[in-house]
Image (cartoon, rainbow, N blue to C red):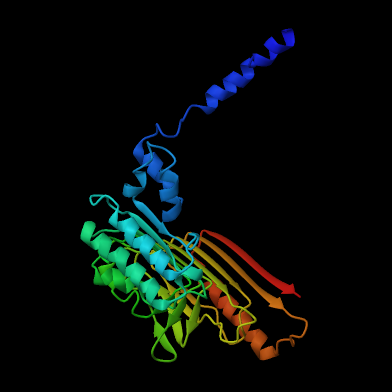
């Protein structure tokens, strides 16, 4: 009998844990915080998460950050297109969109037209609803559609004037991509990662950032140039980060950066590795530079022949010219490595 009574009792610690688990502390948070939580999810996951609670049921309809990502479980292009169209049609019409992220990689977007149609659908939606967008991230893998000049779609819908941040990952950039210049009147941050710069004339010097009037922060990470020479300049640039990592396995993988000129630049990070003998280090014109970090390294393969005297002398001369361009820096970090395989 005693054991029977004992078995019916619930330990105090267990009751306490049960009461703690019963409290939904998240749903009582303000909408703006819940929207911030949902902003880390792609659009499909946002909808799925919202149906878990009555309080969350309509939150996805006015989330200001939209992530159309390859992480979604769509099997083909038409399914993804239907999801985007339905997602936009069911949102609250008065809801503003501050940030949009596109990942055009994966199986769902292997066709060129599908990627363009999806991008156009979203741009048309924003233009009709509010006509403003502050932050855009566009990405595609090497297996995805060859979608060029995505920023031109924003210009066509007159959305580039409100853009503050633009991040492009694995995109093909023609010289005209940023040639709209003053039209990006609020663009302060630009990040280009694994992008390719093109020019119609072989060997032409292009300066794609010079006409961006409010560009303060620029990152150019592991990009390539195809048939052109690149100059990086900006009248109001404050922070500049450049990574050059040329693949030893790609014959046509080059990055021909010949000059960096920024009269107001305060911080400069330059990282170059595995450069080919035909490439040169850039000339620098940075009169107000405060902080600089320069890292240069080359990977020496076992079958590589030693550099001839002329090439070695040229490399040394380029390094000295690069360092001379940093004479105004108040803080300077230099690192040079030779890695042997």
Q: Is 174 placed above or below 69 here?
A: below
Residue 116, x across and y down, in percent:
36, 73
User: Of all residues shown, which one is farthest toward the right?
Assistant: 302
Quadrant the N terminus occupies: top right
Q: Is 113 placed above or below 12 here?
A: below
Residue 317, x across and y down, in percent:
60, 81
| Number of numbered callouts drawn | 0
Q: Is 320 placed above or below 56 here?
A: below
Q: Residue at x 65, y 16 (%)?
A: 11
- Front residue of this view, candidates 39 and 187: 39
Quadrant the C terminus occupies: bottom right
Residue 130, x across and y down, in percent:
22, 56
Query: In the picture provided, is 141 more to the left or to the right than 133?
Result: right
- Front residue of this view, candidates 20 and 280: 20
- Front residue of this view, candidates 70 and 47: 47
Is residue 132 visible in the rendered structure shown here? yes
Q: Residue at x 23, y 67 (%)?
A: 158
Residue 251, x across and y down, in percent:
60, 87
Give residue 232's quadrant in the image. bottom left
Q: Residue at x 55, y 73 (%)?
A: 244
Q: Is 265 placed above or below 324 here?
A: above
Q: Residue at x 34, y 56 (%)?
A: 87
Give residue 124's quadrant in the image. bottom left
User: Of all residues shown, which one is farthest toward the front?
Assistant: 1
Is residue 216 visible in the rendered structure shown here? no
């Amino acid at each position: 009998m005693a054991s029977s009574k004992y078995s019916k009792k619930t330990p105090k610690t267990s009751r306490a844990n049960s009461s703690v688990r019963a409290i939904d502390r998240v749903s009582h948070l303000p909408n703006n915080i819940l929207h911030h939580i949902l902003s880390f999810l792609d659009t499909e996951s946002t909808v799925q998460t919202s149906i878990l609670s009555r309080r969350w049921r309509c939150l996805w309809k006015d989330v200001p950050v939209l992530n159309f990502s390859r992480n979604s479980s769509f099997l083909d292009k038409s399914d993804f297109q239907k999801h985007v169209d339905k997602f936009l049609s069911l949102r609250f019409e008065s809801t503003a969109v501050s940030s949009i992220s596109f990942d055009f990689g994966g199986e769902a977007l292997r066709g060129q037209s599908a990627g363009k149609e999806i991008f156009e659908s979203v741009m048309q939606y924003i233009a009709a609803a509010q006509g403003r967008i502050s932050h855009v991230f566009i990405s595609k893998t090497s297996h995805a559609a060859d979608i060029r000049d995505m920023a031109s779609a924003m210009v066509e819908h007159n959305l580039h004037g409100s853009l503050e941040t633009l991040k492009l990952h694995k995109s093909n950039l023609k010289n005209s991509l940023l040639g709209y210049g003053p039209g990006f009147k609020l663009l302060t941050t630009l990040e280009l990662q694994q992008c390719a710069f093109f020019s119609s004339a072989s060997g032409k010097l292009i300066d794609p950032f010079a006409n961006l009037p409010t560009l303060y922060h620029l990152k150019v990470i592991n990009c390539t140039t195809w048939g052109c020479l690149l100059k990086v300049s900006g009248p109001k640039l404050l922070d500049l980060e450049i990574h050059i990592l040329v693949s030893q396995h790609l014959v046509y993988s080059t990055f021909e950066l010949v000059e960096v000129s920024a009269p107001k630049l305060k911080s400069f990070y330059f990282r170059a590795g595995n450069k080919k003998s035909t490439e040169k280090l850039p000339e620098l014109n940075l009169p107000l530079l405060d902080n600089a970090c320069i890292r240069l390294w080359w990977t020496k393969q076992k079958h590589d022949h030693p550099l001839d005297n002329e090439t070695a002398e040229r490399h040394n001369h380029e390094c000295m010219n690069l360092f001379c361009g940093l004479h105004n820096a108040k803080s300077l970090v230099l690192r040079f490595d030779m890695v042997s395989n």
